[in-house]
Image: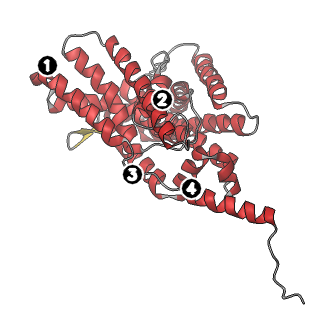
Amino acid sequence: MSTGTVTPTTDEQSLEAENLRSRRGFRMPRLLGSATDITLILILIVVVFAVLDFQSFFTVQNFTQILINAALLLVMAVGATFVLITGGVDLSVGSVLVFSGVIAGKVMELFGSAGWGASLAGIAAALVAGTAWGIVNGLVITKLHVPPLIATLGSYGAAQGLAQIITNGNDLKNVPIELVDSIGFGRVFGIPILVIIALVVAAIGGLVLWATRYGRRTYAVGSNAEAARRAGINVDRHLLKVYAFAGMLAGLAGILSFAKFGTTTLAGHATDNLNVIAAVVIGGTSLFGGVGTMIGTVVGTLIPATLANGLVIVGLNSFWRDFAVGVVLVAAVYLDQLRRRSRSPR
């Protein structure tokens, strides 16, 4: 006699068990992750330069300059952290920065390039332009199934080319003085506003990554996209959001760059994409996805900036920074591979 109870089939039981394992596997990593190790490296770098030239290097003014130099990269690195944690990559951020600055400049020209009305319109235009490029990247990756490396490399060239076409290869310089004085050179209690904006962006990004469902899903997708799908996550939609977010932050960096330099600097960001990825990976985020912290990204961004600053102070060519960053980057990826191997079942 039937009792009304339906006994699950073997396949249904297997699927449910897989879903349960997937949900259990989506645990948030430690807040600090590998940031402790990389912080010790940063401290070591500071100590070395302080010993070599204490009076010039170990000053509040010099440390402030280091933070200013790192601010734009940090804003873009926050978005790149999300992208790399999903197992993707975004090579377009430098060009999207330039394109967003150009769009902002053109919009501000329509408003007379003066006053806060023009400034706010330019800020909004830069954010929209950056987000639009991010959405394009996400759609190409999720709907056309083009690998992120190729999709964003194509966007890198397309965004840079469009910026050159719109400006006929000439930098835009009509930036409202209000924007330059407030964001570009303004300070609050002696701290540059550029630095404050970058740190606020990093803090918000870290909070979202560590303490929200959006952050948990970002780690889940990077850890195992198929398991994430089985657990009910719309992976394509989430990836679209992640790339849109990265694009928006590149757009924010575009208007910050415009305010800082007073020009669109069309040719000044050719290596930003590599510098951003290097900073994020040095900070402990895995190129293979599923691992990374925002604290690590902040420290990873400060290392190249500190190296460049310290090398100039001690009288060495700043090109040595690229060599040092390259060595540290390769070492960081190698150590990440060792960690992955040690965690893998034998």
Instruction: State the quadrant of the N terminus.
Output: bottom right
| Res 174 quadrant in image | top left
Q: Nearer the viewer, mark 4 or mark 3?
A: 4
Kind of residue at badge 1: Leu
Where residue 164 appears, as percent x and y from the top left, is: 58, 16
| Sequence-earlier tag: 3 or 2 | 3
Residue highlighted by disc 3: 31
Q: Pick the residue in front: 23 or 172.
A: 23
The answer to whether mark 2 and mark 1 are in CB contact below 8 A is no
Considering the numbered disc 4 on the image, is that residue within a helix, a strand or a loop?
helix
| Sequence-earlier tag: 2 or 4 | 4
The answer to whether mark 2 and mark 4 are in CB contact below 8 A is no
Q: Nearer the viewer, mark 1 or mark 4?
A: 4
Marks 4/3: CA–CA distance: 17 Å
Residue at the far left: name it.
55
**Rendered image coloring scheme:** secondary structure
Q: Residue at x 75, y 66 (%)?
A: 13
| Sequence-earlier tag: 2 or 1 | 1
Residue highlighted by disc 4: 25
